[in-house]
């Protein structure tokens, strides 16, 4: 047996059942380059990013590792089944698989539950010894890792930045969130020296930008402040996501901006206060969103956003107000997700108990299809509202309003043109009824 793993990041199916393909992948995942650096001696790997390349079905790799985010679960299953037919050893991992391991194991030989960094070597040794286990699970105790093998993706059609991990987990426990379900309020941070080692390596590879991967880095302000102080001399640009509390820490916000951060992504979820109570996110006040956005914008940082459609409080009127809020707020790249009861989450347990889940086929779950009936909409009507909101906000008129014909074009022309391109890509996705996402 050759000791080589083919890691595959599946693409997704569009509403016509066709594979989503793109010319370039901007948001490259970190998992496979990182796991590749943790393989035991004698093991090598290859990476296939299916959205920009075809799967090498006739690969000489005997072992296939399949991951991907939740909405790629169906495609991941189909890939696993095909490679099993071809006699390959197949293992699966990632957030969705970790929440439904008993379902995933029906289609593969082994499932890696939760974080895989501390179990990947054991899986390899067990394959060598013909003692592969069905499930591997070990609670992450440290975020100290070697340099990710970025070189495995450098020859692919990727964007102008690479991912670097800072921390993992989140102290908040929103009821719909898979991170909250898997980490249960834990936040683990990496040693700053290691983070800087990775950032400097990305720069040495010729990149001027990086994506700081962290579920909520502002949960440790002192850590984030020191990291920014060390990033600043590198004169690089970067992006990340965090909680809106950063707007109330003037010193930190300034340090973030001064260090080169030009995009912060916030999970606003809803502009309705009662909705925030429902999802267990009362620490975020919708009445304060416009102030937060303006303050971050005034610091020279663009705001991207994520919001949910299909919460019990949603009505046509509240969604109309959401559209107007996005227009007024000047958010550069708004994104939306249907309220989805992912198995293992508090939301799933509650909705199952109430008998409100319209579709239990979890492999079909995706950001653009609701499976929850609400007091004001059926699940299908929520989906219709989802696309209505997206089509309105990504009309040519509204895209131009927040990009080309916007004061940000005068302040940051090249940055604004980049986001104009992103908006047009999102618009193309929406026309195909494919949710704008990390692809």
Image: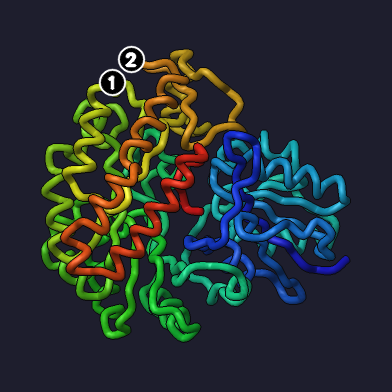
Q: Are marks 2 and 1 in contact (CB under 8 Å)?
A: yes
Residue drawn at 58 percent across, 23 percent down? 360
| 87 displayed left or right of 4 | right
Side of 62 where 342 appears, left or right? left
Above or below 374: residue 49:
below
Going from the N terminus, do you reach mark 2 or mark 1 first?
A: 1
Residue 342 lies, in percent from the top left, at: 50, 33
Q: Quadrant of residue 307?
A: top left
Of 63 and 126, nearer the camera is 63
Residue 404 location in percent, x, y? 26, 59
Residue at the spot of label 1:
315
Image: 222 above or below 96: below
Q: Quadrant of residue 225?
A: bottom left
What residue lies at 26% left-to-right and 80% top-to-bottom? 232
In the picture of the structure, the residue carrying the numbered disc 2 is 376
Question: Quick one: 57 or 120, which is closer to the camera?
Answer: 57
Q: On screen, 149 above or below 35? A: below
């Amino acid at each position: 047996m050759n000791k080589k793993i083919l890691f595959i990041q599946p693409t997704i199916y569009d509403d016509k059942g066709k594979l989503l393909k793109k010319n370039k992948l901007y948001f490259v995942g970190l998992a496979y380059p990182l796991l590749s650096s943790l393989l035991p001696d004698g093991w090598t790997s290859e990476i296939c990013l299916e959205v920009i390349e075809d799967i090498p079905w006739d690969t000489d790799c005997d072992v296939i590792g399949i991951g991907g985010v939740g909405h790629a679960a169906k495609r991941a299953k189909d890939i696993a089944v095909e490679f099993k037919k071809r006699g390959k050893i197949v293992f699966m991992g990632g957030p969705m698989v970790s929440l439904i391991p008993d379902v995933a194991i029906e289609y593969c030989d082994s499932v890696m539950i939760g974080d895989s960094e501390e179990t990947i070597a054991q899986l390899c040794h067990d394959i060598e010894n013909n003692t592969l286990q069905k499930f591997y699970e070990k609670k992450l105790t440290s975020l100290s890792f070697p340099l990710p093998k970025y070189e495995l993706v450098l020859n692919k059609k990727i964007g102008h930045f690479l991912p670097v991990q800072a921390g993992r987990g989140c102290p908040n426990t929103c009821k719909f969130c898979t991170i909250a379900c898997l980490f249960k309020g834990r936040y683990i941070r990496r040693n700053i020296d290691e983070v800087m080692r990775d950032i400097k390596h990305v720069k040495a590879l010729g990149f001027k930008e990086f994506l700081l991967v962290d579920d909520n880095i502002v949960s440790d302000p002192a850590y984030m402040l020191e990291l920014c102080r060390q990033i600043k001399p590198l004169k690089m640009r970067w992006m990340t996501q965090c909680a809106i509390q950063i707007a109330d820490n003037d010193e930190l916000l300034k340090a973030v901006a001064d260090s080169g951060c030009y995009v912060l992504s916030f999970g606003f979820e809803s502009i309705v206060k009662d909705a925030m109570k429902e999802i267990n996110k009362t620490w975020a006040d919708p009445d304060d969103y416009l102030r937060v956005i303006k303050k971050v914008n005034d610091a020279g940082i663009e705001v991207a956003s994520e919001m949910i459609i299909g919460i019990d409080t949603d009505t046509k009127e509240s969604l109309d107000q959401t559209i107007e809020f996005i227009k007024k707020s000047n958010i550069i790249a708004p994104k939306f997700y249907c309220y989805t009861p992912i198995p293992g989450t508090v939301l799933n347990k509650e909705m199952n108990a109430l008998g409100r889940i319209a579709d239990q086929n979890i492999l079909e779950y995706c950001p653009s299809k609701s499976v929850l009936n609400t007091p004001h909409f059926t699940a299908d009507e929520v989906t219709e509202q989802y696309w209505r909101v997206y089509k309105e906000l990504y009309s040519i008129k509204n895209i131009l309003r927040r990009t080309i014909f916007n004061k940000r074009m005068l302040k940051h022309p090249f940055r604004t043109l980049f986001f104009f391109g992103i908006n047009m890509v999102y618009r193309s996705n929406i026309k195909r009824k494919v949710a704008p996402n990390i692809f």
